[in-house]
Amino acid sequence: MSEAKKLYIKTYGCQMNVYDSERMAEALGGQGYVETQSPDDADMILLNTCHIREKAAEKVYSELGRYKGLKAAKPDLKIGVAGCVAQAEGEEIMRRQPMVDLVVGPQSYHRLPELEAKARSGEKALDTDFPEEDKFEVLKNRPKAKRGPTAFLTVQEGCDKFCAFCVVPYTRGAEVSRPADRILTEARDLVERGVREITLLGQNVNAYHGAGEGGDWSLARLIWALNDIDGLERIRFTTSHPNDMTDDLIEAHGTCPKLMPYLHLPVQSGSDRILKRMNRQHTADSYLKIIEKLRDARPDLLLSGDFIVGFPEETEEDFQDTLDIIRASNYGYAYSFKYSTRPGTPAAERDQLPEDVKDDRLQRVQALITQQQKAAQDAMVGKEVGVLFEKPGRLPGQMVGKSDHLHAVHVQGEGIQTGDLRRVRIVDSGRNSLAGALVA
Ligand code: 5AD
Ligand code: SF4
């Protein structure tokens, strides 16, 4: 047997890219590739890119620049660009950077084996189609090797919402949901391989409406079916749109035993005027009402959000509304970004705010968010939570894992194994993590 070829994948951006990178590595596994952690000994380097904010393409070019020496020393080294930048600017990348052998978009990576063969034969290989066939059907036989206790599982892709700032509807295409039985089979396989927590992924995951027994299933129905899988202990999902937060899903947060008390529900702005200009199709008030219902269903729900500051036409008053909705929502985690123009999206054509105004607002929003995050973390002290242990900590005898609310928790404890789910009392709150002690 010939020696295995080595594949180095560098992943940027969201959790779906993490999942896609896994699947791409598996697809190339059939071509004799095994993964390596370093580009230096790789036979193929694949950059799985993100296009959500500015400078994405520049980052790709500067990363490619670093591989010039490697490519010169090893002419057989193949270099590929995958993901959303590949989708948006694939042809341009091939033109501008001749060292790139292969470009593959997020909907066509099941064709990687053919593309790799083409690249190996010395031709340039580019595929940024939105093909008819379902990539997950083509790639359905996943390896059986043991793996860590947590996994991502894509259930839905693409977006039909067209927020005025967002490239996703263009790079990932229209909303598509995978059939429920395929997801359940993949989940059972993951559990057999040692997985105890699954995070369901979709750009608009709560708009899930995959074909299932008796007709289309909602996300809540899918979650309830996953809840029945023995050995699966925890279910999460991300990312959701407020308008798809249906009553059955809200209710599941109160009643479904394996659904964790954590929800990422971006609102982006607290100003109705800006929300309208963003084409979000909801108001600040309707968002707050949804959170209220969620917290009625699950009082200890930890909420997470995304915010864009400095969107075109945002005034100081609009920005104050954003700070107000953050105060009213009381986030456990929140992520904030300066608006960045994305080619081809409606808001990119509008008058832009000065950079210093955006910088100043970002700083202020981040100060408030940091305060809230710390308060939410500190409030866990004294509480008892479940912790799924993922790896050894830095100190001898220490293990670290994630709480039900997704806080990092470290525990000093003899005999705790990776993959154990244990009850833990939180005893201290540090900078970015909690300290806990096993409950006997
Ligand atoms: N500029 C800044 N932030 C953006 N996001 C999406 N598009 C842009 C943009 N053009 C943010 C949103 C989204 C998160 C994934 O990225 O807050 O929820
Ligand atoms: Fe982008 Fe999310 Fe809006 Fe869809 S719902 S356009 S993915 S921000």
Image (spheres, grey):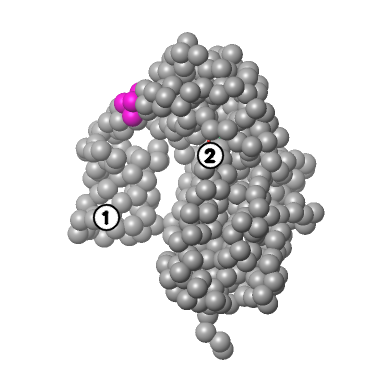
Q: Nearer the viewer, residue 19 or 434?
A: 19
**Magenta-highlighted stretch: main secondary structure?**
helix
Question: Which residue is farthest left?
Answer: 396
Residue 405 position (above or below residue 369): below
Q: Earlier in the sequence, mark 1 or mark 2?
A: 2
**Is residue 227 among what the camera can see?**
no
Residue 422 locus on image (x, y percent): 34, 49
Which picture quadrant has residue 370?
A: top left
User: What is the number of the mark on residue 90?
Assistant: none
User: What is the number of the mark on residue 54?
Assistant: 2
Residue 154 position (above or below residue 425): below
Residue carrying label 1: 393
Classed neighbour count for the residue bearing mark 2: other residues with Cα under 10 Å, few (<14), some (14–19), many (≥20): some
Disc 2 C-beta below 8 A from ligand 1: yes
User: For residue 363: magenta?
Assistant: no
Q: Nearer the viewer, residue 302 or 386?
A: 302
Which picture quadrant has residue 415?
A: bottom left
Quadrant in the picture for the N terminus = bottom right
Residue 418 locus on image (x, y percent): 36, 59
What type is the residue that disc 2 sits on?
Glu
Q: Residue at x 75, y 45 (%)?
A: 211
| Highlighted magenta segment, given as a residue range | 367-372
Q: Residue at x 59, y 13 (%)?
A: 273
Classed neighbour count for the residue bearing mark 1: other residues with Cα under 10 Å, few (<14), some (14–19), many (≥20): some
